[in-house]
Amino acid sequence: MDEWPQILRASLRTPEQLAAAFDLDATQIRKVARAFKTQITPYYAGLIKAKGDPIYKQVVPDMAELAANSGVADPLGEDHDSPIPSIVHRYPDRCLFLVSHMCASYCRFCTRKRKVGDPMKIHPRYIEDGLEYIRTHEEIRDVIISGGDPLMLSDDRLEFILTGLRAIPHLEILRIGTRVPCFLPQRVTPKLAAMLRKFHPLFINVHFNHPDELTPEANEALGRLADVGIPLGCQTVLLKGVNDDPLVMRRLMQKLLYARVRPYYIYQADYVSGTEHLRTTVEKGLEIMESLRGWTSGLAVPYYCIDAPGGGGKIPVLPKYVQTINDEQVVMRNFEGETFVYPQTPRTVPLPEKKAPKRERRPQISPCYGSQTIPPIG
């Protein structure tokens, strides 16, 4: 019999349980819990070494979450791109399919906290509507299955959804986004892995933020998925006091590779309500990227990106390696700060002038967004 349901049932959920476990004020936790759901699996709670450490900061409620002027409810403008409750369709050839409101533990920096944990906002009755939407939109070739966490569904329910998607002729790629291998690795059973392997090409993006999360149990779960041929990527969020240290982030990326997980993204933390105490500066992210490129394997270097406020999509942000560029040469610096020159190929024919395509402007979702108030990245 699978042990993961019993482990999940023993999670810390109530203010009284959390207060007793971490020597906190239950009254304060109760206030925070009214704003966003709380839950920590006993497995993940067991990784906490000290109050306020990098594991603790990710899941234990903090009164700072109630600070005024600390982000907005829908920082990425997902609701604007949601034609039906279970679908977010922003990019031309792919969409997000929300199938579960539950998570094994609830990240305090969750970008979808306005919905996650609420069964009325991500409800099973919306799944068939989502399947029908994807069937009727033949431009969609890639579906990201998310929530909540899809691996919190039963094997049978998840298989039903994957079967429905695989029956759609124009769909090529299926992706699952999950933090279960980090929060509840016992959920990744041989039975689950055997079921998932039937739906290739299937990719899974996991979520790890600190090297201490790559435990033997997590590595076993990841290995079980890799062994059935599922390519694994990791989406990490840059968080203050968690991984905003170049050496910590480098070690995380290296441990992911060792577990057969390709680092995919480091995200600048979204401007979501109640997360100001966990956000870093973009300059810190650029510093971390400079500590990776050249200092460790290129396989361990993900993209650093900002998911643009208001629904602009993911924008990569890079350190300035190119110093100058003209018709004769490109002047660059390498990871050690040394300067190098690359000779350009002479142009014998002038390049044609290219007009920028006209694009309808996306409506503003909040007065705090827009080119007049968001400083340029760089």
Image (cartoon, grey):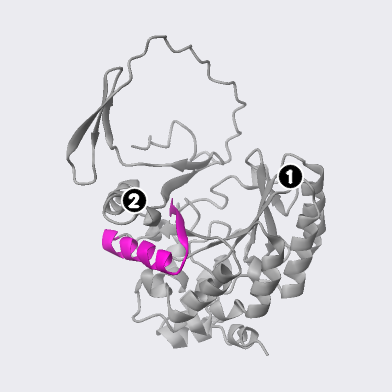
Which numbered disc, 2 or 1, marks the residue that appears first in the sequence? 1
- Look at the numbered disc 1 and give the secondary structure of its residue: loop
- The quadrant holding residue 77 is top right
Residue 274: x %, y % from top left: 47, 59
Range covered by the magenta-colored residues: 245-267
Disc 2 vs disc 1: Cβ atoms closer than 8 Å?
A: no
Residue 278: x %, y % from top left: 39, 60
Q: Going 47% across and 52% down the picture, which residue do you hit?
A: 270
Pointer 2: residues within 10 angstroms few (<14), some, or many (20+)? Answer: many
Residue wearing tag 1: 83
Residue 95 is one of the magenta-drawn residues: no
Three-letter amino acid code at disc 1? Pro
Is residue 211 visible to us here?
yes
Three-letter amino acid code at disc 2? Gly
Query: Is 61 placed left or right of 203 in the picture?
Result: left
Residue 67: x %, y % from top left: 44, 59
Q: Going 41% across and 56% down the picture, which residue do you hit?
A: 276
Query: Is 136 placed left or right of 143 in the picture?
Result: right
Residue 248 is one of the magenta-drawn residues: yes
Q: Going 47% across and 41% down the picture, which residue do you hit?
A: 315
State whether residue 73 is above or below residue 226. above
Residue wearing tag 2: 285
